[in-house]
Amino acid sequence: MPLVDIIGDLDVNSTLAQLANARYAPESDGRPDSSVSTRQGSETLSVLTTLPEVRAAVNEIASGARRLISIYTPDLEPQLYDQTSFLEIIKHFVLTRSFSKVRVLLAEPTRVVRDSNRFVSMGRRLSSCIDIRYVAAKAPQRASAYLIADDRAIMYRMRADTWDGIADVNNPPVARLYLQEFDTIWNASAVDHGLRVARRR
């Protein structure tokens, strides 16, 4: 059974074990870099329990992205994504890399519309590079929150209301698993321009 189907039934420790062990899943796409997945998990896997740890992991993973950053979050958590250090990373990413893209899925966007969020303001100015969508009602709803860089690195929290989670800067099997989930929800969620124009009224 895919991890995304059972994730809600696992406790935190079991989930972290699943994510760590997924590193050893065989690569099936035949890419030359697939051998890196056999590296020991302790080299790149970190367990997160505090806000500073999660914030550092988000910055590290985002700064390593080459072409795509995908964020699933309830409300663009300002303690993570409305921080100057993170905003500078995103700005540098979209302005210095050709064809770079930042995609954000908001599960609970009401608070973002009400509050002044600098990430949203940046999204308005750089709308060709930063795309923000509301999770459609028909799309699968998740209690988790995560950030994926390309199809290799991931910061994952099983529950968005806690800081407990993992970060792995080099785990293609898990990153691709959640990127596939993200893409499914992304494609089911219509573009909503209300988020970008809300502060202009």
Image (tube, helix red, strand yellow):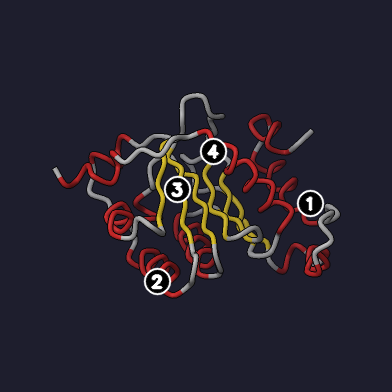
Three-letter code for the amino acid on which mark 3 is drawn = Val
Q: How far apart are the two marked residues, 2 and 1, measured between alpha carbons?
A: 36 Å
**Numbered tag placed on residue 21 in the rendering:** 1
Q: How far apart are the two marked residues, 1 and 4, measured between alpha carbons?
A: 29 Å
Q: Are marks 3 and 4 in contact (CB under 8 Å)?
A: no
Q: Secondary structure at mark 1?
A: helix
Q: First in sequence: mark 3 or mark 4?
A: 3
Q: Nearest the camera: 119 or 97?
A: 97
Residue lying at the far bottom in this picture: please name it: 96
Q: Secondary structure at mark 3?
A: strand
Q: Nearer the viewer, mark 1 or mark 4?
A: 4
Q: Is residue 70 above or below residue 67?
A: above
Q: First in sequence: mark 2 or mark 1?
A: 1
Three-letter code for the amino acid on which mark 4 is drawn = Asn
Q: x%, y% of residue 181?
A: 62, 40
Q: Nearer the viewer, mark 3 or mark 4?
A: 4
**Numbered tag placed on residue 87 in the rendering:** none
**Residue positioned 22% across, 49% down in the render:** 116
- Identify the residue under disc 2: 95
Q: Disc count in the image? A: 4
**Numbered tag placed on residue 104 in the rendering:** 3
Q: Is residue 7 above or below residue 123?
A: above
* Label 2, residues with CA under 10 Å away: few <14, some 14-19, many ≥20: few
Q: Secondary structure at mark 2?
A: helix
**Numbered tag placed on residue 187 in the rendering:** 4
Q: First in sequence: mark 1 or mark 3?
A: 1
Q: x%, y% of residue 87?
A: 36, 64
**Residue positioned 50% across, 45% down in the render:** 72
Q: Nearer the viewer, mark 1 or mark 3?
A: 3
Residue lying at the far left in this picture: please name it: 201
Q: Quadrant of the N terminus?
A: top right
